[in-house]
Image (cartoon, rainbow, N blue to C red):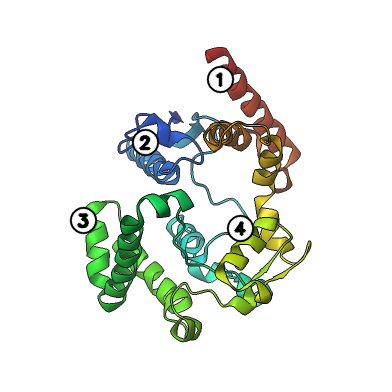
């Protein structure tokens, strides 16, 4: 018996808002996990019921939402990518980690980012948030099991064993390191302030009083800066917007469309590329017709 399953993200148990089902939304990745878990449960049920073959169609949006393990290499945060692969069934011994810092690209990994207007309007709230972050980190280091238990109480799908391994990796590689013990958690060593020629960097370092230690040049930080090119292109197109609010509205809409059409051509075959482009154009035509 052959079973065909068409799975959409809306209607999945735990997906409370349609806004969270859009790529780039705050809870989109979590909704992908829920969608994949429910689909896998349905597949298991089909096989238990006598099915000999199950064919699944991802029918949400651009149709590339289900989490799969069909890649040779990925870039991402070690603390997330490694354990996402393990949870997808990839043996730990098959994964080779290549940290940026060990191959010539030093990056900072811990920061609390706050809008300048928020700092001015609500300084006490910002101080309280930073203090809570520091105290929470200290408490987690002191009693990791308590932190894991708290997360499991908030989220029943929380895999305690997997997350315990993730936490140990983060503590060993990012928090309880000789550099952190010497310089402080999340601190910036001025001698390592290397950026490209974007003028706002100079203004920031001047305000911090470390401009004499700021090393910048057009190609100085090229590998890191290239990751921002899509946003930079959008910024150039937004120069005549009347306000930051209207520019942000454009960014939000453009990001959704950009993600639909950005199919990472270098990672797909010609046949897959044509299929993804066709799906993207179909989604676009439906969106335009609905508007």
250 w.r.t. 38: above or below: above
Task: Please name the residue that numbered disc 2 is placed on.
Answer: 46
Classify mark 1: residues with Cα within 10 Å, few (<14), some (14-19) or many (20+).
few
Q: Kindly report the distance in space between the C-alpha atoms of the residues bearing marks 2 and 4.
A: 32 Å
Tell me if mark 2 has few (under 14), some (14-19) or many (20+) residues whose alpha carbon lies within 10 angstroms of its own: some
Q: Which residue is mark 1?
A: 287
CB atoms of marks 4 and 3 within 8 Å: no
- For marks 1 and 2, the one nearer the N-term is 2
Percent x, y of residue 269? 72, 42
Task: Please say if the residues under marks 3 and 2 sit with CB atoms less than 8 Å apart.
Answer: no
Sequence-wise, which precedes: disc 3 or disc 2?
A: 2
- Which of pointers 1 and 4 lies earlier in the amino acid sequence? 4
CB atoms of marks 3 and 1 within 8 Å: no
Q: Nearer the viewer, mark 2 or mark 4?
A: 4
Question: Which residue is pictured at 52% across the width and 47% down the height?
Answer: 68
Q: Which residue is mark 3?
A: 153
Q: Secondary structure at mark 3?
A: helix
Crowd class of label 3 (few under 14; some 14 to 19; many from 20; radius 10 Å): few
Q: The N terminus lies in which quarter of the figure?
A: top left
Q: In the rendering, at what x and y percent does residue 147 appear?
A: 26, 66
């Amino acid at each position: 018996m052959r079973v065909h399953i068409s799975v959409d993200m809306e209607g999945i148990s735990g997906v409370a808002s349609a806004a969270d089902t859009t790529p780039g939304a705050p809870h989109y990745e979590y909704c992908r996990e829920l969608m994949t878990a429910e689909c896998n449960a349905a597949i298991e049920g089909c096989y238990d019921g006598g099915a000999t073959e199950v064919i699944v169609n991802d029918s949400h949006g651009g149709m590339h939402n289900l989490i799969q393990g069909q890649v040779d290499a990925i870039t991402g945060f070690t603390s997330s990518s490694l354990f996402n692969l393990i949870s997808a069934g990839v043996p730990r011994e098959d994964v080779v980690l290549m940290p940026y810092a060990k191959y010539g690209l030093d990056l900072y990994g811990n920061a609390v980012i706050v809008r300048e207007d928020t700092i001015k309007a609500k300084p006490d709230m910002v101080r309280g948030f930073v203090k809570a972050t520091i105290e929470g980190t200290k408490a987690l280091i002191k009693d990791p099991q308590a932190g894991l238990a708290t997360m499991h109480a908030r989220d029943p799908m929380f895999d305690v064993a997997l997350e315990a391994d993730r936490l140990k990796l983060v503590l060993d590689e990012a928090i309880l390191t000789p550099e952190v013990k010497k310089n402080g958690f999340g601190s910036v060593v001025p001698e390592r302030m290397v950026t490209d020629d974007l003028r706002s960097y100079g203004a920031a370092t001047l305000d911090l009083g470390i401009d004499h230690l700021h090393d910048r040049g057009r190609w100085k930080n090229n590998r890191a800066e290239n990751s921002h090119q899509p946003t930079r292109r959008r910024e150039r197109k937004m120069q005549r917007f009347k306000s930051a609010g209207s520019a942000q509205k454009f960014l939000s809409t453009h990001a959704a469309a950009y993600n639909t059409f950005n199919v990472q051509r270098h990672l797909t075959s010609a046949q897959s590329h044509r299929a993804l482009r066709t799906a993207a154009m179909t989604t676009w035509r439906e969106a335009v017709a609905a508007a």
